[in-house]
Image: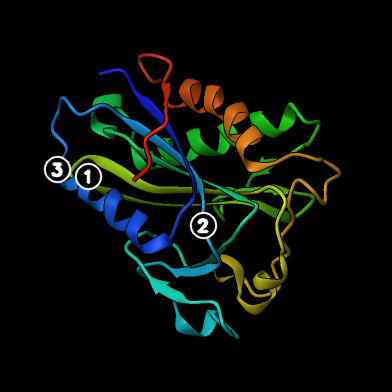
Amino acid sequence: MKPLARWLGCVAYEPTWRAMQRLTEERSPETPDELWFLEHPPVYTLGLAGRDEHVRTAGDIPVVRIDRGGQVTYHGPGQLVVYPLIDVRRLGLGVRALVTALETAIVDCVAEFGVAAYPRAEAPGVYVAERKLASIGLRIRRGASYHGIALNVAMDLEPFLRIDPCGYAGLEVTDLGRLGLATNTRDVAHRLLPHLARTLKLSEYPDWANERH
């Protein structure tokens, strides 16, 4: 059951969400874990407890209410999204341990670029100088996880001004580009993978696969 890492490119949000749900519903104890790396076209997603008032001015960007935890966030081109579709029971991970593993992987990855990032216990995600660099939102079902990480790499941050990011009015957001790094989502995906493999304690290093969902 060697884990797989998939680069999916820029894919529409709702079909990808449904594919995650489908894999989670159909998986068995023998199903390999998968890490999906991708971007989405512009979309706001609102979690199970999400409050409509946190979307202040959506404009022409669609709003999708989904089945993860957390409030509202934005996805768009130039943001690396990572969906860990993993059997958390098999790996012996609770929800808090899973969130910590994802945060640690991001912190260690961006440290390679010379960026000093950190998590905050009261507000899941990764921050740099009080600005949010990455968001984390998860769903655990049938002992497996889906949804995951949104790491801002080189993107238009204006849509974040139309919402209260993660439910926090006035929360500032940044990306690796504004921190002085000239990079792209594909490169960051390759740099992040070994950190995820380590912090998630995957039994083997994931193979890259080229299939698209």
Distance between the alpha carbons at the discs numbered 3 and 1: 6 Å
Residue, x 75% and y 55% (percent of image)?
A: 130
- Disc 1 marks a residue whose amino acid type is Thr
Q: Are marks 3 and 2 in contact (CB under 8 Å)?
A: no
Q: Quadrant of the N terminus?
A: top left
Q: In this orientation, which residue lies closer to the viewer: 159 or 49? A: 159
Q: Residue furthest front?
A: 211
Distance between the alpha carbons at the discs numbered 1 and 2: 20 Å
Density class for disc 2 (Cα within 10 Å; few <14, some 14-19, many ≥20) is many
Mark 1 — residue?
24
Q: Are marks 3 and 1 in contact (CB under 8 Å)?
A: yes
What coloring was used for the rendering?
A: rainbow
Residue, x 83% and y 46% (percent of image)?
A: 179
- Disc 2 marks a residue whose amino acid type is His
Mark 2 — residue?
40
Residue, x 56% and y 82% (percent of image)?
A: 60
Q: Which mark is residue 26?
A: 3
Going from N to C along the chain, the mark reached first, 1 or 2, is: 1
